[in-house]
Amino acid sequence: MKKKAIIISIRGTQLSKKEKLLLLREHPWGVILFKRNIKSVKQLKSLTQTIRNIKNDKYFPILIDEEGSTVSRLRSIINHDISAYYFGKLFSINQKLSIQLYKKYLNSLCKNLKKFGININTIPVLDVLRKNTNKVISNRSFSNKKKIVKKLGKITVQVCHANKIISVIKHIPGHGCATSDSHYEMPKVNLNYKELISTDCYPFKLTNAKLAMTAHILYQKIDPNNVATFSKKIIKETIRKKIGYKGILMSDDISMKALKYDLVTNAKKSLAAGCNLVLYCAGNINENLKLIKEVPYIDDFTSKKTSEIYKILR
């Protein structure tokens, strides 16, 4: 069945009648869950199973943003206070121990996600930490050293896939240099192209990644008129050519304040620029309905890459 080029979100801990009808009649690529959707293990398992029953799809993509520490949507049901930065710091002291513990941690996390009915996690954060930048990334990043970020990022993708969980590398082509938070305003970065490629883009050169999420950042010296999510130049020349990313490219949340247009325009501009999917996280049923009517079905490229994802999930 052909899917629409959107990942939708829901409002509460169970599906409303309108949400059930939307899933029954329409064909979003996937659904993303947040803290507001999670009350208990039993409830979460029931929710994910209900979604898949409606879609009649055992492997229907259900996503979560479960990074740990400051970004833990599962906090109400699991203790997940450990951060990516912890493993990066340990890596700089004892590589072998860091990798051993990180793999053990990832295997445990993936086991829980599978138990809950979640099959895509939006990790790893591959943003390289920079001095004098916004704290939105902070300990979500592995390190200020690009090689450590890339190494642990590669391990993340490998271990997740081995556990039949799909990872999402983010925020491509790099959010670590931003001095403001794209949830609330448009970050503007003055990095030159050479610096962006050599440092911020470096960790994203992972050939095994199947999904990547864009950064809502204005790279003023590369495309002064468009944030990366809306930039054909950045997506085509930097993400696809220079980085060499060959998987599905999804936008970050199109309801974030960094994007200045209405939701439908944000969605259309993201797709026109080269994103394959748009992500909508606010959970408003009317906006979900409006968006899913407006976005197109996925193209042949995205359909092929979706099939590759399903092969890993089986």
Image (cartoon, grey):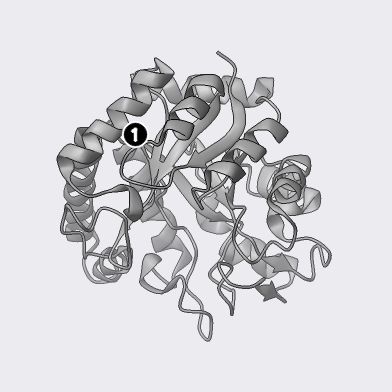
Which residue: 57% across, 66% down? 199
> In the depicted view, which residue is nearer to us: 39 or 196?
39
Q: Position of residue 181 (x, y in %)?
A: 55, 73
In the figure, 51 relative to 110: above or below?
above
Say which residue appears at 58% left-offset and 72% top-offset. Answer: 184
- Toward which corner of the image does residue 67 lie, by quadrant? bottom left
Res. 276 visible in picture: no
Q: Position of residue 264 (x, y in %)?
A: 72, 46
Is residue 242 visible to us here? yes
* Residue 258, quarter of picture: bottom right
Examine the rendered structure and indicate whether residue 41 appears above or below residue 187.
above
Badge 1 amino acid: Asn
For label 1, the SS is: loop
- Residue found farthest to the right: 225
| Within-10-Å neighbours for mark 1: few <14, some 14–19, many 20+ | many
Viewport quadrant of the N terminus = top right
In the image: residue 77, left or right of residue 221: left
The residue beneath circle 1 is 119
**Where is residue 118 shown, x and y percent of the image?**
31, 36
Write the residue at 61% across / 27% down: 4
Residue 310 vertical position relative to residue 93 in the rendered view, above or below = above
Q: Quadrant of residue 260?
A: bottom right
Residue shown at 32% from the left, 39% from the top = 14
Farthest residue to the front: give it.
17
Q: Position of residue 266 (x, y in %)?
A: 72, 51
Residue 54 or 120: which is nearer the viewer? 54
The reply, left or right, for residue 295 in relation to residue 139 is right
- Asked whether, in this view, residue 67 is left or right of residue 11, the answer is left
